[in-house]
Amino acid sequence: MSMKKFVAFVFVLAHLMVGVVFAAAPLLVLPDYHAHVTDLAHVLPYAEQQLLEKELIAFEAQHGAQIGVLIVGSTQPEDITDYTQRVAEHWKLGRQGIGDGLLLVVATKDRRVRIAPYRALESAIPDVLAKRIIDTQMAPAFRQGQYATGLREALQSLQQAILGGGGLEMANPDTFQQKWWSQIKKWGTDALFGLLLAFWFYVIFSLIRNYLSRFLWPLPAALTTALLAGALCYWFSANKWLSALFMVLGYFCRAKIQTIKQSGKGGNQPFSLNIGSGAGSGTRSGGGGDSAGGGASGRW
């Protein structure tokens, strides 16, 4: 073996050994979220940490967005990007259904910092702005050991960006009961409208099925009514699941509409509606039916 091949072999073997060592190294245990500012590296004076904590609590109470700061010594064996992603998924900052959270991680021994906005804040805090805040406000202060100063200036810039980004629902605890009452009234109105719509749907498609029964057997008439109901619903809503439901309802529309003729002063009454199969209504189709094809698949 020549000297060049031997050196190349040793170089590749060394890289493989380093890779195995790092792959075998366990990941750091993630801290739980207990406060807006978590200083595991103990670089912030207690008074400064409490001041930042109060400012972030007040910002969340007034504007809704939740900001978390985590200071650690090192993120090794992970890069700060992967470590921050794990912490963000573990802490789940921001309001449920909105996702207006922001995580700031500082690794003092690694001399690394990362700003990670959650999905709702990505437009307010783009990567270019986050990089500028790190380079112009955090890095200069951190080089001098002034972590509190760098964090305060960066957080002020981030809060201004969040307020200027727009598209966020501001927190207002005073209107919580009013929102719930408005939602309850909306649900009541929707329920009443749904009942009326279901009644008229049943009447109209029962008439259609009774008319089709004059020319078709009971089962083909029911299937044709179901297809008409599903197609009409899809034309109005473009919702396949709602259309499938209307197809099932259309299949079971079996109200009996009949004209009653009476002699004497009463004359002819317009018509009567009997809900149910009634006597002599023909052969009843079997149950079961076909699946609507619903469901979902995923991976974990």
Image: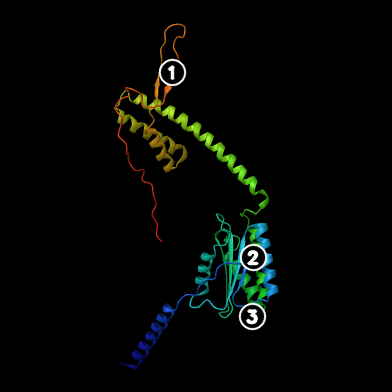
Q: Which of the two discs, 2 and 1, labels the residue nearer the N terminus? A: 2
Which residue corresponds to the image point at 34% horizontal and 91% vertical from the top-left? 6
Tell me the amino acid under the disc marked 3.
Answer: Arg
* Residue 66 x/y as whole percent: 61, 62
* Residue 256 x/y as whole percent: 39, 23
* Residue 141 x/y as whole percent: 66, 77
Can you tell which of label 3 and label 1 is closer to the viewer? 1
Q: Nearer the viewer, residue 195 or 141?
A: 195
Tell me the amino acid under the disc marked 1.
Answer: Phe
45 left or right, relative to 284:
right
Q: Label 3, on which residue?
A: 143
Q: Nearer the viewer, residue 178 or 145?
A: 178
Looking at the rendered image, the quarter that the C terminus falls into is bottom left
**Can you tell which quarter of the image residue 73 is in?**
bottom right
In the image, residue 177 sits, relative to residue 191, either above or below, namely below
Mark 2 to mark 1: distance in Å? 71 Å
Query: Is residue 50 at least partly visible in the picture?
Result: yes
Query: Is residue 230 at least partly visible in the picture?
Result: no
Which residue corresponds to the image point at 59% horizontal and 39% vertical from the top-left? 185
In the image, residue 239 sits, relative to residue 217, either above or below, namely below
**How busy is the neighbourhood of tag 3: few (under 14 within 10 Å), some, or many (20 plus)?**
few
Q: Which of the two discs, 3 and 1, labels the residue nearer the N terminus? A: 3
Q: Nearer the viewer, residue 263 or 85?
A: 263
Q: Label 2, on which residue?
A: 158
* Residue 181 x/y as whole percent: 62, 43
Mark 3 to mark 2: distance in Å? 21 Å
Looking at the rendered image, the quarter that the N terminus falls into is bottom left
Secondary structure beneath dot 3 equals: helix
Q: Label 1, on which residue?
A: 271
Secondary structure beneath dot 1 equals: loop
287 left or right, relative to 94:
left
Secondary structure beneath dot 2 equals: helix
